[in-house]
Image: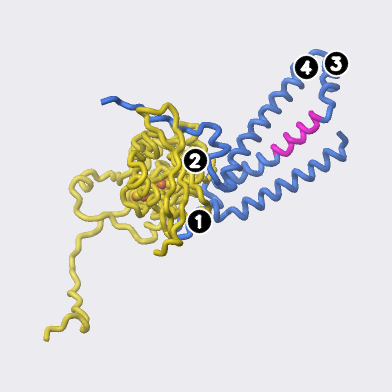
Amino acid sequence: MTEDSIKQITLKVQRYNPEQDSTPHFQEFLVPVSRGTTVLEGLLYIKENLDSTLTFRTSCRMAICGSCGMLINNYPHLACHTQIEEFHSDTLTIKPLPNLPILKDLVTDLIPFFNTHKSIKPYTIRHETEEMENPTAEFTQTPQELETFLQFTYCVKCGICISACPTSASDKLFLGPQALAQCYRYCADNRDEGWQERFLLVDTDHGVWHCHLAGACSEACPKGLDPALAIQLLKRRLTSQAIGLRKKQQSSPVASPITETKAKVPFPEFTAKES
Amino acid sequence: MKQMQPRQNYLGPGGWVWAGKYKLERYLYLLHRITGLGILLFLILHLCMTTIFRIQGQDVWEATMALLHNPWFKIGEYLVCAAFIYHALNGLRLILQELGFALGRPTPPVYPYKDALRKKRPWTIAMIAVIAILALVFFYDFIVGGW
Ligand code: SF4
Ligand code: FES
């Protein structure tokens, strides 16, 4: 890397130490940036070289753990998934995600958010308890059946959709786009039979019916999920259930035991030949 | 060890207006609320006028009507009319889409990501165009009808 490909960029970071500060304030840092530098790398540079007290959460640095959600130039992003160059600006403002409690600097408290996720029972529920306790085989599912909910399984629980949602901004009891989308994800999975239990949890004023389709969650989601679509499809299921028009979803059967095995395919010619 | 309370960071109703650089539908959500409240306010005023004032006899009624006969109330009336057009048409869109129609099916998230609302945005924009045309037609009507 040549010297002149490195630019100096100002990162204006919101600081808040609950032990010392009564309100958050901003602190500016000058950070060297070259092509491809991510916002997370900028923050790590600050932590390593300028101010080791700067606090933020990160783990995978490849957009799969969902730790590093933050508000960058007034839009929620995963810091590891966002390059500084994208903003075409010499100053970046970095704040913690709104609508989530701040613990310190850029770290938000995700525990209540995870608890809401847990509350909608995000696991496969079946009526056959014996099969669930002592499984004999997998539940079968065709690729087409998988496609109906596959995109909603990519959620990394980063909280970005909560910070984008206008309803979450004013309704503290709202389940939020993440949990509602996951509710749909399990209800649409034909290996699952727990829709009755989950419908009771989301068919409330602070559940699906408080979503008024602002669509900001889907717009901001860094994993390309579409929580807004999932919530509307969930409303559709609830409505058709209420008026008695719901088509029954066939639960997938347990795979039948393997009775015959195919002969092993021999290694092709080009692989390791004994001399 | 000292226990620290997390700092609450809800944006509150201010977050309806501004939470970052978002696209169209988030602002339609806000406008839907504002127009809804506006129409409700009008309805309450209207009911008050036509009941409480009316039963007090012709004099009171005529005095109220004279009070209302000024450009500001006319503008207000036009705004209620425009709000009604918006609330009705956007409401139809919401009913359709919230019941899962006109949104398409879930697709695998392939980059660049495109969510269902973004795919349908041309239709939403067409709806806004219809609202604008109707609002203009009514504006013309109000002007020609005399202030
Ligand atoms: S739905 Fe998207 S934005 Fe919301 S928590 Fe999951 S990955 Fe994050
Ligand atoms: S560090 Fe894991 S998502 Fe950014």
Question: Do tags 3 and 1 sit on the same chain?
Answer: yes
Which mark is in front, 2 or 4? 2
Residue at screen point 83% across, 30% down: B71
In the rendered structure, which amino acid carries the disc numbered 2? Answer: Cys
Dominant secondary structure, magenta? helix
Answer whether residue B121 is visible to the viewer in this image: yes
Which residue is the extreme one toward the top?
B56
Dot 3 crowding, Cα within 10 Å, few <14, some 14–19, many 20+: few
Give the CA distance from mark 2 to mark 1.
18 Å
Q: Is residue B35 left or right of residue A83?
A: right
In the rendered structure, which amino acid carries the disc numbered 1? Answer: Lys
Tint of chain A:
yellow
Query: Please, which chain is the residue tagged with disc 1 on?
Result: B
> Element under label 2?
loop
Residue at screen point 55% across, 53% down: B118
Residue A165 tag number: 2
Question: Do tags 2 and 1 sit on the same chain?
Answer: no
Query: Please, which chain is the residue tagged with disc 3 on?
Result: B
The number of numbered badges drawn on the structure is 4
- Label 3: which residue? B58
- Label 4: which residue? B53
Q: Is residue B146 left or right of residue A49?
A: right
Q: Are marks 3 and 1 in contact (CB under 8 Å)?
A: no
Image coordinates of residue A150 in percent, x first then y, are 39, 55
Q: Which chain is blue?
A: B
Specify which label sits upstream in the sequence, 3 or 1.
Answer: 3
Answer whether residue A162 is visible to the viewer in this image: no
Which residue is the extreme one toward the left?
A275
Which mark is in front, 3 or 1? 1
Is residue B75 one of those drawn in magenta? Answer: yes
